[in-house]
Image (spheres, grey):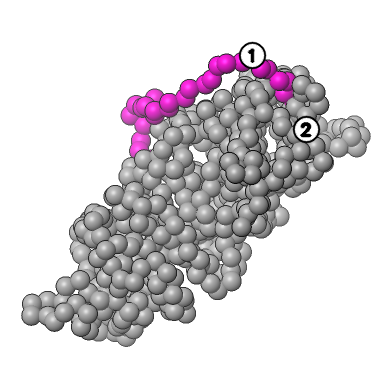
Amino acid sequence: MAVPAFAQIDFSGTWTPLYHEDQPERIPGPELGDYLGLPINDAARLRAESWNSSRLTLQEHQCRVHISPYIYRGPLELRIWQEKDPETQQVVAIKNFISTFEQTRTVWMDGRAHPPAYAAHTWMGFSTGKWEGNILTVYTTHIKTGWIRRNGVPESDRATLTEHFIVHDNYLTHVSIITDPTYLTEPLIKSQNFVLDPGWQGTWIWPCEYVEEVTNRPKGAVPNYLPGANPFMHEFSDRWHLPAAAVQGGAATTLPEYRAKLKDAAAMVAKPVSLNSPIPRAASTHDLPDDGRIHLLPVQGNIYMLASASGNTTVQVGSQGILLVDAQPASLSAQVLEALAKLSSKPIRYLINTSADPTHTGGNDDLRRAGVQVFAGPGARALSDAADGAAIIAHENVLNRMSAPTGSQSPTPTGNWPTDTFAGDVKEIFFNGESLKVLHQPAASSDGDSLVYFRRSDVISAGNLFSTVSYPLIDIEKGGSFQGVIDGLNRMLDLAVPEHEQEGGTMIIPGRGRLCDEADLVEYRDMLQIIKDRIEAMMKMKMTLAQVKSARPTLDYDPLYGAQTGSWTTDMFVEAAYKSLSPK
């Protein structure tokens, strides 16, 4: 049981920020190309230089808000209060209402644990606090992608935040320490001050609804600047006569010793982003546990997610039984059945395969045999006596890939094959009081990909089209294409409807990785469209595949999705993308 903690001090009240520090960054906003004082790496620098503020005119970006590591630096009123246990009067949580975008943040003080790695992320993240003397120290995880500086410098969803709230009389000092293994080479420490303002009675109501700000824009277009093509990168350094190399940021530029280097004329020139030394994939406390286990996570409605390092299985439970989207590898089938037994005593009725990928179909036979068909045909005996097990549903191309229609040796055992296929764009199912749409996405990861939309629960099971831990698989030999994957992501964006502040609402279960919502899906779609724009620009310059690989069009996203070893490397992804985008 979590135990509430007694507060050392009570700094409840309304606090107004003081802007004597970093005022240009915090109020009017930082200038483009100003990365002064930031210990960023080349990946962050390239991503920032690619930033085009027109991206905020996209409907799916218009209602996004700032993340907890950044929001305290803007124009806001900060209201703080305590929530206490009614029986013991111990403090269970300290609440923050941040008037900017009317965001409420909870700092749990009762000793509860942070959510698992595969849980959803939010703008505010998940925060726990403890008293260190009269200083409130807060640790936050599960934060969405946001800004380190809102001129394009990114903060990844692998970042964690440590804060110290320090009160002296009527003044509150807030110290934030951001650790981001993706884009920072060392922790970034910032501070901001507030003064108690007991007379402030206002608020900031922000009922955002997106509109079409730019008409006739091609569907799926993502405004960005190609590497080296951003015309605004030198305005800041030229206006203030600052060394071009210094304003590009980096840990070395934050130290006093850097002044001595400025005497060297060469140091006055901006250095291009280094493409030679690889940026390894960032390790994180949020990496999925590679422990060979199945982990169960409630999603919403009657939908659950079974997560493993191999991938995710979507589970729908109800009075009619269990419906699954994708099996785990056969080695995990026993654990899947064990997890299902915790959710329902009903049998498995349906198993939907979103592709022929072995990580999605390896346990088909085990799960099918453990289930019972809803309908076994004319004259069938009781459902409990049905011998064929649960129905396995997939697009007909999945069966074609798993079987041997030409008489050659079958690549998979017959027990793993789909038992019910569809040939068109959609397969509709009504089960457990809920309508489902199995939507075929042609020429995506392969020619048999589907996504599944649970309409009442408002959950999308994305299959191979979406992953939070890797670039998408593009199997050209099996009919896959780069554009097809992007089309599938845009199709899901059309289905998804976010709740307040571009958060929650439709939840999305990726093929691999943590639970997501539309905002996370947008980041992935934007990433792929930007990489596509870069590769197509290189192809127009007649660059060969080897030259494109050397130019590293994925550099700023490699710490998140890249891999140098394994079954699907960054090199393989770039090659598949290049071949897919090449004229036939």
Examine the structure image and report whether residue 212 is included in the region drawn in magenta.
yes
Q: Secondary structure at mark 1?
A: loop
The magenta segment is 193-221
- The type of residue carrying mark 2 is Ile
The image shows residue 529 at horizontal and vertical percentages of 46, 45
Q: Which mark is residue 166?
A: 2
Q: Quadrant of the N terminus?
A: bottom right
The image shows residue 12 at horizontal and vertical percentages of 67, 28
**Disc 2 to disc 1, how far (Cα)?**
22 Å
In this picture, is 230 found above or below 45?
above
Task: Please report the residue visible at 34 percent of the width from the left and 61 percent of the height from the top.
Answer: 316
Q: Quadrant of residue 239?
A: top right
Q: Residue furthest left?
A: 379
The image shows residue 338 at horizontal and vertical percentages of 44, 75
Could you classify mark 2 by the number of other residues whose Cα lies within 10 Å: few (under 14), some (14-19), or many (20 or more)? some
In the displayed structure image, the side of residue 343 where residue 275 appears, left or right: right
The front one of 186 and 220 is 186
In this picture, is 85 found above or below 57?
below
Q: Secondary structure at mark 2?
A: strand
For the image, the number of numbered tags is 2
Judging by the rendered image, the residue that carries numbered circle 1 is 199
Q: Is residue 559 visible?
A: no
